[in-house]
Image: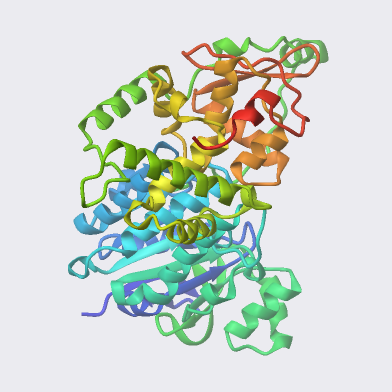
Amino acid sequence: MTVAIEMGQTTAGAAAAMDLEELLATRLLVQGNSGSGKSHLLRRLLEQSAPWVQQAIIDPEGDFVTLAERFGHLVIAAEDHTERGLQVAGERARLHRVSTVLNLEGLDAENQMRRAAAFLGGMFDVDRDHWYPMLVVVDEAQLFAPAVAGEVSDEARKLSLGAMTNLMCRGRKRGLAGIIATQRLAKLAKNVAAEASNFLMGRTFLDIDMARAADLLGMERRQAEAFRDLERGQFMALGPALSRRPLRLHIGPTETSPRNSTPRLMPLPEATTEDMRAVILAAPPPDASRPQRRPAPDLLEQLRAAKAAAPVIQPDMVEAPVSADELAERRERVNRTLRAVLAEPDAGFRAIGVLYQEFVVRCRIEGLGAAVPDLNEFRRMLTHARAGLGTDLTEDDGWQDVSLRASILPDDMQGVFMMIARAAKEGWPCPGDAAIARAYGSHSLRRAQRLLGYMEEQGLIVVQLDGGGRRIVTLVELAWATAPGDPNGNDLPAEQIASATPA
């Protein structure tokens, strides 16, 4: 049975239909400048196909969460879950055939990419028995499959680009039909865009985007100017699921609306300048009264319960029994190898995967064999090393709360949090932006500032400046506070430098 979903009308007044089964086999690319009606088109497509096929929407701005009430989609707030949690959620969504909206609103670009990649990876990696047909819509796809590197880390970009490439190149055999929408074709990775066979091209003004759109639709370059004349909601359609020849159509109405509607002109409020001065320039409320976004005590109780219930796995266990002295000697050799890896130039800015490969090679040269830690254990060791933590501190009961709090954060942020916690515990000056960026594996000072802001939003720390512009960071509940430190300083405190080697 052929399922045709109505997208709107052609310029001749005829119904414009899309073959849903053909779409599942061939994928779709939507392009249009901001305000062209691109999101409206996606909403129409999702509403019309919702009764027929499972859907997953990667939603960077939270525009599609309103589908939940009318069509029963499960909304997943990405900022409330870890990457591992989202990967499992993607697997379970396919297993139980539940339509979902992954709301990435509130996350910075790097964490949007990481969490979207984890969710897509979970859907992609399910067993063959669960390869049910599914529409996977990715709005603002240029954020997740950028043509060139931006401010995000190479690791995050590779994860996200790999997930998008799997969706568009290998997803069809697994029942995943990618539908990607972008404002700028020039900003979208070509190997991702090239896999689409159906196209809906909306209004655009830049020559490079018009030329690429014309090429994809098989139009002559002189016809590319037509994309400037399209009205809001009008698109040029081409593809086996739409039309064998370029066809202009107007997208029909939708049953649901985005949370943020198009801005409307409205009169300014009537008030005197003095009244507004009193309102706008009033003293800000104290930081202590600022509400926390999530209650830390409840999370910590959950983490403690999960940790108590989880089986204890010793990564350095080997098949044959060994004595305590032999285990201690192996740990020392492993730690010595890690110190050698971190002593290499630019080790702080290299991807974890690259560092781990070098670490494994060095361990094998040392003859460690089965005692080589796996990648997860290596991440933990690297986090502790960059935070300047020794075995004596990590085994301290008072430090366990810090480890629990750190586990709330993404893996790549935990080392930064522990480094700041160490400085607060010892009463050292707060590390500067350069030191924080280096511990994160970045050269960007702005990213260091965003990291502190993110941790503060999670209710883990409070950041203050003293009268001299020096920064003080206090850990919530533990009441540990760093000494004032210069945010523009280039190095860690001398005491922390001395201890910043793995035990």
Q: Is residue 111 visible?
A: no
Q: Is 493 on the left-hand or right-hand side of 128?
A: right
Q: Is 74 on the left-hand or right-hand side of 400?
A: left
Residue 327 sits in quarter = top left
**Residue 347, image x, y percentages:** 62, 51
- Residue at the location (48% across, 61% down)? 361
- Residue at the location (74% across, 87% down)? 222
**Residue 267, image x, y percentages:** 71, 31
In the image shown, does 179 or 315 lie closer to the viewer? 315
**Residue 357, image x, y percentages:** 49, 60
Where does the N terminus fall, quadrant-wise? Answer: bottom left
Q: Check the image and report above or below for 49 versus 246.
A: above
**Farthest left residue?**
129
Residue 53 sits in quarter = bottom left
In the image shown, does 499 or 73 lie closer to the viewer? 499
Q: Check the image and report above or below for 161 versus 12.
A: above
- Residue at the location (32% across, 54% down)? 90
- Residue at the location (70% across, 44% down)? 444
**Residue 434, image x, y percentages:** 72, 37
Q: Check the image and report above or below for 63 versus 137.
A: above
